[in-house]
Amino acid sequence: MATDFARTATNLVKELKTHLEANDLGGSGSASGGSGGAVGSGGGVRGGVLRDPGQALPAYKEDEVSKSAREVQEHYDSVVAILGAFREENREWDTRPEVASSVLIHHQSLLRNKRLLLAYQNLRLERIKAFRWKCGRLPRATQDKLSPPERDFVKSYERILNSYQKQCRVDLTVGFFPPGENLLKVRVTEDLGVMEFDYIGEADLQVGTVHLLPHEEAERLIIEGKLEHLA
Amino acid sequence: MEGPATSSGALPPDTNDTDDLTMEPSDDLGLGPEVPGGTEHPLEHDYDVSNDAQLLRQAWINESLTPEVLMYREDLVDRIRSLIARQEKIVEDYEQDHNQALTRAIRFAEVSRIKFCLRSYLRKRLSKIEAYAIHIYMNEELSSKLSPQELEFAKDYIDAVNRLFKDSILSRLPKDYNDLLHQSMESEAPDMIPEPSLDRHVFVRVLDDLGDIPIDDQNTTFRLQEGDIFAIRYRLIRDFVDSGRVELV
């Protein structure tokens, strides 16, 4: 079982590392590992695949997670078994250091797995939130990569955020960039018809036309991919 | 800056049907003299405008640079809100007045910047609240620094995150090990709550003579005088940030 543990845990660590690389959160090294763009179905998805931004949030690794959880259960069973046997022997810990240390090892391995699992989930959580803030909502490609509990979380996060914004009467999903000028030069990439804007009034947004629009409203449409910012 | 030359030019002149130029009723905030019919003497506001905007800017900088969430500046945020409303009204009212085009552009730029600052300030706080939600929520002193809305946000956020971790991970772990806050039942005190690192170094400008402050256990002290700028552990000057006796740079 010891080898089994080593394997799954290592896979998880790898998973986290790939995660970090995929999200440009650190660890730019070891990219050469993916020379063939090898996709191991079990653990290390590495290299080229992750450079694709559509892959920035890898699909939830249900298999890995449940494997680790099973392993945790095995450790737990061992701890319980060892402790049970030891109690029956009715001796002091001092006299059996080997038993004490095996309990400790199982215990620590268990904690380690737990930490890794939580860290994995937490990283995904942060990433999901980052998407939410950056894109206004989760892109469809990303939504498909979520686990059911994550989908629930996205829903409640949305609700919480909306209720906060409503109560504070403020829209926090725009205005990420300090406005340098009043009007942004944009090109329309999606037909929007005539829209009403602050400050400048109406504008007829036909595909391909160039406009100067107020910063805040332009930003919202740029984030939604309906306008293109021209420097 | 003004770009009526392009296709989205200025609004074709149509009559402004709101003759009512009175300001928003916002004077219950002790904002200094309100000018009735404000568009006639809009410059009267400017002292307050720049002052509150400056305060907000500093609050935003402080919030961005400190590891922990600071006291919510409720009165300031309220004042800024009414200020934004007033400025936007002025911008609107000047729409037909071509003599005021430049003033209008400047005001619009100003109000956009203030809005950016306010949003960024609130966002910054939310992101810190998210990161340390449980820590803040379990500590009365810290949760008193949040606005009621933020507190509610924190509470709901904790619930959502708890549910996520429970559903996806913790429910699969054996009992004794399935708590989000404890590594296992071995640990009596919760030992898995992320806390901000208060020992991070920050750059501060001292705004007031603070005298000698202790910097370690050996009674070593360190003199902070007005105008000094230090890189210092946040913990040491923590109490002075909310009281406005130091500011971060």
Image (tube, coloured by chain):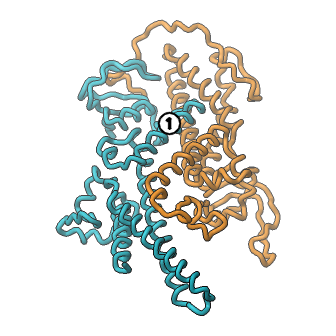
Chain colours: A cyan, B orange
Tell me which corner region of the image, top left, top right, bottom left or bottom right, holds residue B77. Answer: top right
Q: Is residue B10 visible?
A: no
Chain ID at mark 1: A
Q: Left or right: where does residue A136 sit relative to residue B210?
A: left
> Which residue is rendered at x = 24% and y = 71% of the image?
A32
Q: Secondary structure at mark 1?
A: helix
Q: Position of residue B224 (x, y in %)?
A: 76, 64
- Spot the residue most to the bottom: A95
> Which residue is rendered at x = 49% and y = 64% of the image?
B174
> Which residue is rendered at x = 75% and y = 56% of the image?
B240
Q: Nearer the viewer, residue A208 or B98?
A: A208
What amino acid type is highlighted by mark number 1? Answer: Arg
Q: Left or right: where does residue A105 sit relative to residue A68?
A: right
Query: Where does the N terminus of chain A fall, quadrant-wise?
Result: bottom left
Q: With respect to residue B53, does B144 lie above or below?
A: below
Query: Where does the C terminus of chain A fall, quadrant-wise?
Result: top left
